[in-house]
Amino acid sequence: MAMIQEQTLAVRSERVTMSSNDLAKFKTDKVCVFYGVKQALKDVRLDIFQNQVTALIGPSGCGKSTYLRCLNRMNDTITDCRVEGSFLLDGDDIYSKDMDPVHLRARVGMVFQKPNPFPKSIFENVSYGPRIHGLARDKHELETIVQTSLEKAGLWKEVNDRLHQPGTGLSGGQQQRLCIARAIAVQPEVILMDEPCSALDPIATARIEELIDELRQNYTIVIVTHSMQQAARVSQRTGFFHLGNLVETGATEQIFTNPVDQRTQDYITGRFG
């Protein structure tokens, strides 16, 4: 763990400065989630700050992915799941009856643990969202959106000569970047990432981490990760979950070098988890 604190955090501290003027993109409070009679989250309060990467860490089954899915109402698809609490996106209640979940998921995109490109061409993977949301008036605009999205995902130079070939034919790391391009294409404000590198090799993981750092200039990002090294490398804020509770949250450097709660210290130093 000394390597995390001395190397990755030293690099981060040089390029990140936390400010009292940070704007909360998401404000969540008193969040409780139940799967049937089992309570998965207990009174979680967490703000997600604009144009920053917030990492959610903690042992398996602690509630971090459950919390992530609450932010774009993915838990709505689970019949026995009940979500309570306040979720405000730029002041809008995302669980209001007036909030269209489809529109919400355009504002809050998601990248999953395993790359899941559609069984379609690279072009159709990226153009699908803009087409169904009516974001392009003609073929030229659609082509521009596809190119721009692939460029932002760092994939354009690798695939521009094979846009009509299947997305499933790409490598694992390229597929994950294609999924990121697909999420970007509908002009989201927030990107949720649920362990986006867990199925990737170290080289592909490094490329995704570089991409995350680039994307936060224009997007707010929340990432669930089991890798504390990754959390230290890519995030500006970190929240530690344990047994359904948000134990502690704060600037990543503070969480990893001077945590307030003993449970956070024990997890970071490998005493459990």
Image (cartoon, rainbow, N blue to C red):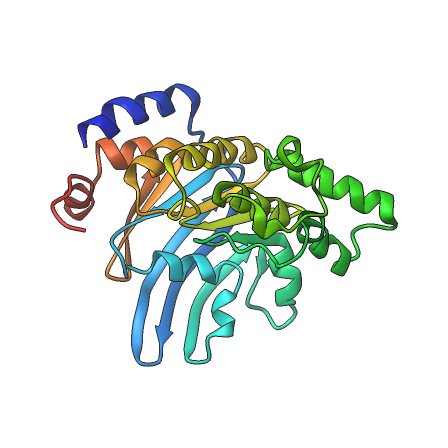
For residue 126, above or below residue 73: above
Residue 256's x, y, as percent?
25, 35
| Side of 193 relative to 217 (left or right) | left
* Residue 63 drawn above or below residue 161: below
Task: Point out the image quarter for the N terminus.
Answer: top left
Asked if one can make out residue 118 in the rendered structure from this viewpoint, the answer is yes
The residue that appears at 42% across and 25% down in the rendered structure is 17
**Left or right: 54 with respect to 186?**
left
Q: Is 112 situated left or right of 145 in this image?
A: left
How many circles with numbers are drawn on the protein?
A: 0
* 179 over 207 or under it: above or below: below
- Residue 229: where, in percent of width, then height? 30, 35
Camera-side residue of 116 and 264: 116
On screen, residue 191 above or below 252: below
Question: What residue sits 38% from the left and 43% below the top?
Answer: 55
Residue at x 71%, y 36% (from the top left corner): 161
